Image: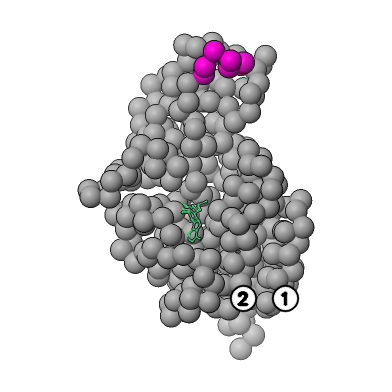
Amino acid sequence: MLSFVDLFCGCGGLSLGLQKAGLNHLAAFDYWDKAIAVYQANVSPHAFVFNLANTEAAAESVSRYSPDLIVGGPPCQDFSLCGKKQIGRRANLTLSYVEIIAAVRPKYFLMENVPPIIKTEFFKKVYLAAAAAGYGLTYKIADLSFYNVPQKRKRLFLLGVLGGGENCLDVYWKPYVAKKPKTVREYVTENPVNAEWNFDHYFLYPRYMERRCTFSMDEPSWTIVSSFKRNPGPKFRPSPNEKYDYQTAPRLNLKHAMDLQTFPKGFNLFPEGAKISESDARLMVANAVPVNAGEFFGKVFSRYEAAKIKNKTTLF
Ligand SMILES: C[S@@+](CC[C@H](N)C(=O)[O-])C[C@H]1O[C@@H](n2cnc3c(N)ncnc32)[C@H](O)[C@@H]1O
C-alpha cells in the first residue's frame, strides 16, 4: 500500500480521496490552524500547523515519514483567472513545493493547480526543477466532471515518478477518464449526500458577469468558488443563455457545495472548539481538490506501482 504526505492540505479533500483509493495517510501540513482543526476531526490527527515557505524545515519534517508519495495543492490565487495575473508571493510556494520534493525524493509526487499556470514562465521553472530532480512527468488539464465529480472544474494535475520516463503515467490515467461528464442528478442518486436536492435547477453565482448562472440537475455544476452563495445585486446581468429565471431559481447552501466537491456525508466542517465561521468553511470547501478526483489520482499511482511490481516478478 502506498503511503503519502499531504502538503498545503487544507481541510483534506485530496487526502480523503487518496484514502478512498486505499493509500495510507502518514501526515499533513498547512499553516491555517482552522483548516488543520477540520482535517484532524475528519481525516487524521496527524496534521500539523506549519509554514511551508520554510522549505528546509519542511523537508526535514516530511523526510521523517519517508512517504512513497507527496501530494499538494500549493495556493493558486496568483495564477487564477479571477486573480490579478501577477506572479507573487503565493506563486513562489509552488516552487517551494518542488524544492521540498527534490529534497525528500519520494517515489511519486502530485501537484494540483489552476490551468492558467501552464502558460507562465513559472510553470516551465517548476517543470524543469522537477525534471532536474530526476522525475519523469505526466500532466494534463483535467475537467473533473469526467473524474466522477458533478462539477465542471478544470485543474492542472502534474504527476512525477522518480526515475520514470516522460508521460509514463499516461496509460494508468487517460484510459480511466470517463467518456461523459457526471451530472448532479447522477451523483446525488448514486451517493449518500449532505444536502437536500429537491429541485430540478438552481442558481449559482457566476465567476464572471454574463456567464450562465442557472443550472439543470441534469448537467455538471460550474466550478464552486468561495463566493458561490452571493446574491445577485442590482447591477447583476444574467447570461443571454439562461434557461431558467435566475431570480426564482433555488439557491445552494454550504451542504450542496460539499456534495458538488464530493465530500462524504457527515463531513464535519465545524468541529467543537475550532471556531470555524461560515466563510472559513466556504473557503475550505471551495479550495479543496474534490474527494473523488483525489481517489482517481490515488488509483493512477497504485496501478503504476502494481505494474512495476508485476514486471519485477516476471523478470526473476
Ligand atoms: C488550494 S488549498 C489546498 C486544498 C487541499 N489540497 C484540499 O484538497 O483540501 C491551499 C492551502 O494552502 C495553505 N497555505 C497557503 N500558504 C501556506 C504556507 N505558507 N504554508 C502552509 N500552507 C499554506 C492554505 O491555508 C490552503 O489551505
Label 1, ligand 1: CB separation under 8 Å: no
SS for callout 1:
helix
Q: Image height check: is 306 above or below 313?
A: above
- The amino acid sitting under disc 2 is Ala
Q: Is residue 273 visible?
A: yes
Give the prevailing secondary structure in the magenta stretch: loop
Q: Quadrant of residue 45?
A: bottom left
Magenta-drawn stretch contains 48: no
SS for callout 2:
helix
Identify the magenta region: 232-238
1 and 2 marks in contact (CB < 8 Å): yes
Q: Which mark is residue 309?
A: none
**Image-based side of 198 in relation to 142, left or right:** left
Tell me which label, 1 or 2, sits earlier in the chain. Answer: 2
**Image-based side of 145 in relation to 253, left or right:** right
Task: State how the image is colored.
Answer: one colour
Q: Position of residue 245 (x, y in %)?
A: 54, 11
- Dot 2: within a 10 Å radius of its alpha carbon, few (fewer than 14), some, or many (20 or more) residues? some
**Residue under circle 1?**
132
Q: Is residue 307 visible?
A: no
- Towards the viewer: 84 or 109: 84
Q: Position of residue 91 (x, y in %)?
A: 63, 56
Q: CA distance from mark 1 to mark 2?
A: 9 Å
Q: Residue at x 45, y 28 (%)?
A: 229
Q: Quadrant of the N terminus?
A: bottom left
Report the number of numbered marks: 2
**Residue under circle 2?**
102
